[in-house]
Structures are given as structure tokens and as C-alpha cells.
Image (cartoon, rainbow, N blue to C red):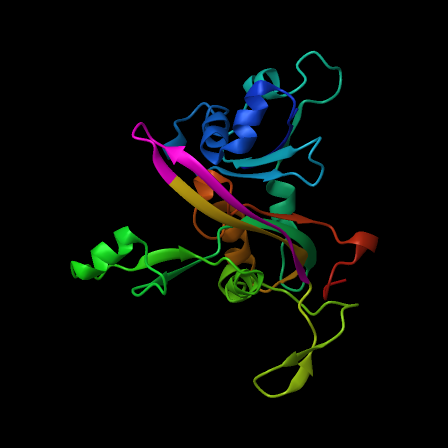
């Protein structure tokens, strides 16, 4: 069975500030919420900070978690309101079918693999000079490149982003014709830098958060994307794709 959890974070707590500032710290707290070892199952998580005063942590797990430790360290442990909610993911997976449409959100780490970076760092330059032919994983840093990264991967993940219903058409530079803009928005772009491991290796992570509308094209591929995530850096809060009903009850081609 798979579970999707929503956890409320109190940003004024000291431990909360450490969790919000470092994906490595947040990952450790997330892994502590399941009884199995972290390597025994795929865990996906995402931090939504639409309201910076009430951040929400979403976590997808295969085993049923317990988030009491996060509520006590980074929530409102003495409050009467709900600290976290854990829901069975099966009903959502059962609704996925070709032609159906959903609202979606995804925080990802858009990257490219190249053998020749335009502006290599000293370490990269040393590798190239030594004849190392392994490719480098480089982050996409512009909004256009990050959007293209997502659009280039929709087919392999079992969905299509249809044209926006209200946005004006944009020119297609290839044939000089106007084409409708896809129904997706880049709502947040962030750079995270934090230490990893006992030696303090510095990690720099560029993330992009997308929101929009998708249409299912392949049930199995989309189900796999929901359960396994999209793109790299999943341990650091990237890859979790979540779906929601469209406003007004719109459902797509199957009605």
C-alpha cells in the first residue's frame, strides 16, 4: 500500500528553521517517520511554501508512517488542530485513465548531461584535462530551459500538458506559426546550498516548481512517475508529482 501524508510545519520553531534551510536535514526527519530502513523503499517528499507562515510538507511512502516526531520538533504539539494527515493513495491511482485530466504540481531538479560544460569549474576542468570521458550533470538555471526540460519528458512519464484555455498563442519559431501555450506555470525557482556527510561536502541544488494541467496518455507510465518520482535529487525534496481534481469538476476526454 502507498500513503500520501501532509504535515504542517511551524516556521518559528528552532528545529523548523534548520529543516526548512537544509534539504539534508529535512530528508533525515522524513526517513525517521517510517519503521523500515530508508533504503528499503522509495520515499518522495516536497515542501510547499505558498504561505511562508504555514509551510506544508508532503511525503509519499510505501509503508504507513508516523510523523509524531516532526509534530513535536517542528509543529504545534500542544495545539488542538490537526498536526498531520495520512491518506491511502490507492483511490487516486484507481482514477488514472487515458484522457482524464488533473491539476498537478511538481518540484524537480532540471538537469542536463554533457561532456563539455561551457564554463567548467576548476574540478571539472581538471577532469577534462585528465581525459575523463564521464559526462557532467549540470543544472538548468533559466526559466525557459527548466520549462523545456519538463515538456521534453511528459511523454515518457505517461502524460501530456494540453494548451492553456485562456493564454494567448505564442509563435513557433520553427515554422512561424502561432501555437497555443501549454497549460503549465513555473511558480518557484530556488537555489539550495548545504553540507552533506561528515566531511562537509557542499551540495548546490537548483529546483523548479511547476503547476498546471495534465492529460493522461499512459496509465502505467504515469502511475510509475507518481510512485517513483521524476528527475534526480529525490532525497532532497525533488520528484514528487501530485495530482488534484480540476476546478469546476472538469475531467477531460472521458467526461
Residue 125 lies within the magenta run = no
Q: Position of residue 233 (x, y in %)?
A: 44, 45
Picture layout, residue 97 above or below residue 4: below
Main secondary-structure element of the magenta-colored stretch: strand
Determine if residue 40 is in view. no
Determine if residue 216 is in view. yes
Q: Residue at x 25, y 58 (%)?
A: 125
Picture layout, residue 226 above or below residue 178: above
Quadrant occupied by the C terminus: bottom right
Q: Residue at x 56, y 58 (%)?
A: 219
Q: Position of residue 180 (x, y in %)?
A: 70, 75
Work out whether residue 89 or residue 189 is closer to the camera in this orientation and state it. 189
Q: Position of residue 163 (x, y in %)?
A: 70, 70
Picture layout, residue 88 above or below residue 149: above
- The range drawn in magenta is 184-202
Q: Residue at x 36, y 65 (%)?
A: 118
User: In the displayed structure, does residue 144 sit left or right of residue 102?
Assistant: left
Amino acid at each position: 500500500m502507498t500513503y500520501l501524508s501532509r504535515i504542517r510545519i511551524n516556521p518559528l520553531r528552532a528545529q523548523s528553521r534548520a529543516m526548512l534551510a537544509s534539504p539534508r536535514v529535512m530528508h533525515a526527519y522524513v526517513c525517521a517517520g517510517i519503521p523500515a530502513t530508508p533504503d528499503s523503499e522509495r520515499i518522495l517528499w516536497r515542501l510547499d511554501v505558498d504561505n511562508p507562515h504555514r509551510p506544508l510538507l508532503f511525503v509519499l511512502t510505501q509503508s504507513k508512517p508516523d510523523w509524531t516526531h516532526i509534530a513535536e520538533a517542528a509543529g504545534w504539539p500542544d495545539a488542538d488542530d490537526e498536526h498531520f494527515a495520512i491518506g491511502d493513495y490507492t483511490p487516486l491511482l484507481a482514477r488514472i485513465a487515458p484522457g482524464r485530466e488533473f491539476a498537478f504540481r511538481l518540484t524537480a531538479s532540471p538537469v542536463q548531461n554533457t561532456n563539455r560544460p561551457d564554463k567548467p569549474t576548476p574540478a571539472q576542468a581538471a577532469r577534462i584535462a585528465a581525459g575523463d570521458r564521464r559526462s557532467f550533470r549540470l543544472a538548468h538555471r533559466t526559466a525557459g530551459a527548466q520549462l523545456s526540460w519538463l515538456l521534453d519528458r511528459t511523454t515518457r512519464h505517461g502524460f501530456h500538458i494540453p494548451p492553456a484555455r485562456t493564454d494567448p498563442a505564442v509563435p513557433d519559431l520553427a515554422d512561424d506559426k502561432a501555437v497555443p501555450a501549454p497549460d503549465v506555470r513555473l511558480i518557484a525557482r530556488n537555489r539550495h546550498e548545504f553540507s552533506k556527510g561528515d566531511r562537509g561536502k557542499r551540495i548546490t541544488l537548483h529546483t523548479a516548481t511547476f503547476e498546471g494541467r495534465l492529460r493522461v496518455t499512459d496509465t502505467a507510465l504515469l502511475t510509475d512517475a507518481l510512485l517513483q518520482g521524476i528527475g534526480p535529487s529525490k532525497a532532497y525534496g525533488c520528484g514528487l508529482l501530485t495530482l488534484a481534481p480540476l476546478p469546476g469538476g472538469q475531467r477531460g476526454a472521458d467526461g
